[in-house]
Image: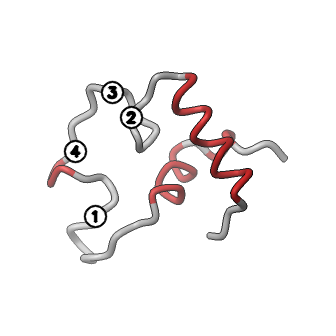
């Protein structure tokens, strides 16, 4: 997934406006393994913006 700097800024602004953590989840969210980007099954690490957009696909304006 390739995002423009403008799209990344749009996501960051949404996180700040909605007072969410850096992954777009509520501030009190706890993750197994401490990081939602690491897939313990595959051993792969997701891009942070990819993780956010999988959970919130409506965050980017068309």
In the orientation shown, which residue stands out farthest toward the top?
18
Q: Where's residue 38, x and y in %?
A: 28, 64
Q: Find the distance from the CA under tag 1 to the CA under tag 4.
A: 10 Å
Tell me the tag on residue 31: 4
Q: Where's residue 51, x and y in %?
A: 47, 55
Asked whether the beta carbons under mark 4 and mark 2 sit within 8 Å of each other, the answer is: no
The answer to whether 28 is drawn above or below residue 45 in the figure is above
In the orientation shown, which residue stands out farthest toward the left?
33
Q: Find the distance from the CA under tag 4 to the CA under tag 2.
A: 12 Å
N-term mark: 3 or 2: 2
Q: Nearer the viewer, residue 18 or 5?
A: 5
Around disc 1, counting alpha carbons within 10 Å, would you say few (fewer than 14), some (14 to 19), or many (20 or more)? some
Around disc 3, counting alpha carbons within 10 Å, would you say few (fewer than 14), some (14 to 19), or many (20 or more)? few
Q: Find the distance from the CA under tag 2 to the CA under tag 1.
A: 16 Å
N-term mark: 2 or 1: 2
The answer to whether 41 is drawn above or below residue 14 in the figure is below
Label 1: element kind: loop
Q: Nearer the viewer, mark 1 or mark 3?
A: 3
Tell me the tag on residue 1: none
Asked whether the beta carbons under mark 3 and mark 2 sit within 8 Å of each other, the answer is: yes
Asked whether the beta carbons under mark 4 and mark 3 sit within 8 Å of each other, the answer is: no
Q: Find the distance from the CA under tag 3 to the CA under tag 2.
A: 5 Å
Answer with the quarter of the image where residue 56 lies.
Answer: top right
Q: Find the distance from the CA under tag 1 to the CA under tag 3.
A: 19 Å
Around disc 4, counting alpha carbons within 10 Å, would you say few (fewer than 14), some (14 to 19), or many (20 or more)? few
Task: Tell me what residue is drawn at x 18 percent, y 50 percent.
Answer: 34
Tell me the tag on residue 38: 1
Task: Tell me what residue is drawn at x 33 percent, y 27 percent.
Answer: 27
Q: Which residue is mark 2?
A: 21
Asked whether the beta carbons under mark 2 and mark 1 sit within 8 Å of each other, the answer is: no
N-term mark: 1 or 3: 3
Q: Which residue is mark 3?
A: 27
């Amino acid at each position: 997934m390739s995002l423009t700097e403008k799209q990344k800024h749009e996501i960051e602004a949404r996180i700040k406006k909605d007072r969410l953590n850096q992954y777009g989840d509520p501030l009190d969210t706890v993750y197994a393994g401490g990081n939602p980007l690491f897939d313990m099954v595959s051993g792969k690490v997701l891009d942070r913006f990819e993780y956010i957009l999988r959970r919130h696909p409506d965050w980017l304006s068309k």
